[in-house]
């Protein structure tokens, strides 16, 4: 385990923070329109109002910081996650070496609970800290999605 992940685990235990993962390093996070895949419509649809999404679980933030279309801009990219379940394509798993991202440590008091694993804020937020993470910080239980 890296020092970065250990630090994030300690912050997670405090329960005062939520975490946002991104391949980008920004001074401020701005609300963006979120999308989810709708199986019935077979397309991406808007998911609520524009917001900053964050999680009280660092593994979700690390997963999103590293496994995303920016780091894997090839055809066939796909990923999915839950509180303790992470999935992506075999091609992504084979190309994780040297991938990195950023986890934003954010004040939980500026967010509202949206679900068990997601908190949201509709305001611009400056992070308390930005911690760079690497592929070896990813959760160990990532499984391959059959394509």
Image: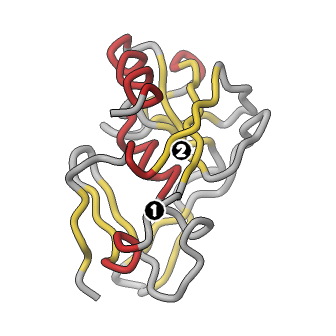
SS class of the residue under badge 2? strand
User: Which of the image's four quarters has the N terminus?
Assistant: top left
- Look at 38% across and 68% down and name the residue there: 79
Disc nearest the viewer among 2 and 1: 1
Foreground of the two, 57 or 138 = 138
Residue 69 lies, in percent from the top left, at: 56, 70
SS class of the residue under badge 1? loop
Is the residue 54 above or below the residue 38 in the image? above
- Look at 70% across and 44% down and name the residue there: 31
* Alpha carbons under labels 2 and 1: distance apart: 18 Å
Asked if residue 13 lies left or right of residue 44, the reply is: left
Is the residue 18 above or below the residue 75 in the image? above
- Residue designated by label 1: 97
- Counting residues from the start of the chain, the first of labels 2 and 1 encountered is 2
Q: Residues within 10 Å of mark 2 (few under 14, many from 20)?
A: many
Residue 22 lies, in percent from the top left, at: 59, 49
- The quarter of the picture where residue 122 lies is top right
Asked if residue 43 lies left or right of residue 9, the reply is: right
Residue farthest along the right direction in this orientation: 27
Looking at the picture, the colour scheme in use is secondary structure
Foreground of the two, 115 or 137 = 137
For residue 118, which numbered disc appears in the image? none
Asked if residue 25 lies left or right of residue 49, the reply is: right
Residue 55 lies, in percent from the top left, at: 43, 36
Residue 10 lies, in percent from the top left, at: 37, 16
- Look at 51% across and 76% down and name the residue there: 44
For residue 21, which numbered disc appears in the image? 2
User: Which of the image's four quarters has the C terminus?
Assistant: bottom left
Asked if residue 9 lies left or right of residue 108, the reply is: left
């Amino acid at each position: 385990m890296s020092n970065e992940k250990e630090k994030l685990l300690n912050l997670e235990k405090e329960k005062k923070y939520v975490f946002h993962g991104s391949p980008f390093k920004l001074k401020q996070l701005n609300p963006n329109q979120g999308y989810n895949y709708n199986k019935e419509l077979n397309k991406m649809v808007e998911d609520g109002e524009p917001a900053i999404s964050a999680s009280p679980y660092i593994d979700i933030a690390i997963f999103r910081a590293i496994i995303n279309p920016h780091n894997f801009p090839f055809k066939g990219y796909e990923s999915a996650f839950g509180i303790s379940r992470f999935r992506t394509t075999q091609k992504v798993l084979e190309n994780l070496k040297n991938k990195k991202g950023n986890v934003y440590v954010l004040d939980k008091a500026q967010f509202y609970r949206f679900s068990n694993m997601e908190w949201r804020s509709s305001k611009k937020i400056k992070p308390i800290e930005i911690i760079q993470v690497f592929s070896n910080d990813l959760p160990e239980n990532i499984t391959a999605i059959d394509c």
